[in-house]
Amino acid sequence: MKRWRSKLLLLGGVTSLGLAIPALSQDSDAPESLLPPGFEDPQPPQDEAQNQQVPVPPARPTAEPQIQVIDAAEEDLPPLEDLDVAPAVEIPDFARRSTDIVGTMGPANWGLGEGAFGGADGRLLSTLMRRLDAPLPSRWTSILLRRALLSRVPAPPNVHPVDWVAERAWLLLRMGEADGARMLVQSVDVGQFTPKMFSVAVQTALATADPAALCPLVESGRKTSDEPVWPLSDAICAALAGQASKASTLIDQARRRGTARGIDLLLTEKMVGAGANTRRAVTLQWDDVNELSTWRFGLAAATGAEIPARLIGAAPPQMRAWHARAPMVPIDQRIDAAESAATLGVFSNASLIEMYSQIADAADVTEIAGSVGGTLRIAYAGRTTNARVEAIRKLWDQAENPSDRYARQILTAVAASRIVPDEKLVGDVPDLLASMFAAGVDRDSARWANMIGELDGRAQARAWALLAVGSPRPAVDITGGWVGGYRENDDSPGNYKSKLLVAALAGLGRVDEAEAADLAGDMEVDLLREDRWTRMLDSAAHARQPGTVALLAAAAMQTPHWRGVPPRHFYRIIRALRQVGLEYEARMIAAEALSRA
């Protein structure tokens, strides 16, 4: 398996700046196997943390390449005894806040329960998290994984409890979930931080555009490493504390020593000026800046500085998600990033509606009619069904690519669910259903089942398939030639969507094993073929470990696009989710696959 490492310095390129913080190891190659990159030879993170920069995964290509679906390789798991466990950090008992169980979500608020990872070995779970190439192509898999990572769970055996929290927070950051990462980091006292947690905490402070969160870390962080991030952070924190003289002295020292240059030093000065009366007038020049590092993003967003659209557009997807929730950035500069964040699962339907509503409320009355916010109001509150549907269509048609269209379907989900089935809308049924399922509005979908007979051709096939996998209970006839009819109208390469449909129906138990085997066999798919990953997933499902199942499902989706997920793995994912009581999530993932693949 070939691998390559991508490392971005905290303050820019290696040739121009020497500022970095200790990093976690992260393989970011799109693997030939769908198992985690480097799964057979994980690197102990504690050693690497002293010598490497914290990477931010590179942006994925915006144009969809020709993707060959490759089955996971049959590889041995790494011997657990070869994986190192970080040594305990000695903290006086009186200063400890328990790290035995950490998380923000319990069963009452969508958490997966304290047994989410069961007795799974912490070294294996940590390796899976560290090697995961995020963000994922599936919005609903990401939502489920976020819940698993934020669940209130105990540290598993054979892993340092603080490092366990750090691994979870680091993965959340790579998924674009900056707020979730902050909640986990803040659950641990700084006095108990390990070197790994210091790395993640700095990244989290910048991702949430909250440089003040660096201040509690500076003194202890300097004992962990001599990286230049600490004196620069010290300058910022001195300014925030009103110590203008100290802040100015530290900035001047950084300039003389070459700790930071160009935009990075200017942003630091701007942050210092925002915190104290240092009489530093700073004019930011972005013309020569070619990439948006974490430091640049964090300080620019914290001071409300406008980041050039070309840099935000070229930033990794997770950084655009961070930008979408940065409170100091004007909301109209964040809305495009918010739609991108919605496709990742970071933003909800309600969050998007709230943002567009705020923009519309601040707009001139004469400008509302042609705006997205104005159209959205009609979609939700138009006087007639025709007016609402026309507005919904308009929002979809404004999208420039499939990803943007999916974001607009999330935006219109509740509006779509309010449309009363009508024969006049036969051409809109598949897209209305796709919109509902995009945001998980599944109960109202069954109302459209009686319309299936009124449709024909590809529209009928699409609508039937979405209802077959997405409705709470089978709302349409799944027997006979319906699957064959869908396949006849399937224009995806190699009938890929038809293969996913059969895999989903089999995983949900909506066709029996014999029929599923026959349908899959006709398309040359062996749903029952086993490998190391399938055995791990089946074992986790049998042990009723929904968190482990969610993590392994994500590991099988390390591909920029849905078409990189093998149908036989998709079948195992859907079946395993159903076995651990996550049938709703399984249905939403299945509907998403048929909508987006």
Image: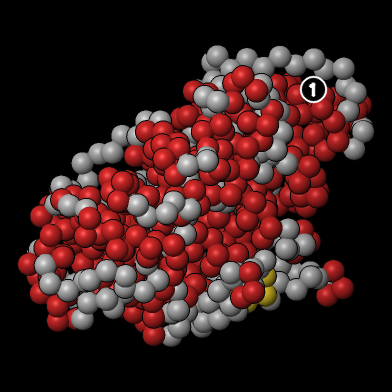
Would residue 21 be seen by someone viewing this image from the given angle?
Answer: no
The residue at the point 55 percent across, 25 percent down is: 369
Which of the 4 image quadrants contains residue 170? Answer: bottom right
Give residue 259's position: percent from left, percent from top. 68, 28
Task: Tell me if 536 is positioned left or right of 413 in this view.
Answer: left
Quarter placement of the N terminus? bottom left
Residue count near mark 1 (Cα–Cα under 10 Å), binned few <14, some 14–19, many ≥20: some
Residue at the image point whose x is 82% and y is 27% from the top: 274
Q: Quadrant of residue 288?
A: top right
**Callout 1: SS:** helix
Residue at the bottom extreme?
543
Q: Which residue is mark 1?
A: 252
Comparing 222 with 24, the one in front is 24
Name the residue type under label 1.
Asp
Residue 441: give x, y in percent of width and height: 47, 59
Q: Nearer the viewer, residue 505 or 264?
A: 505
The answer to whether residue 256 is visible is yes
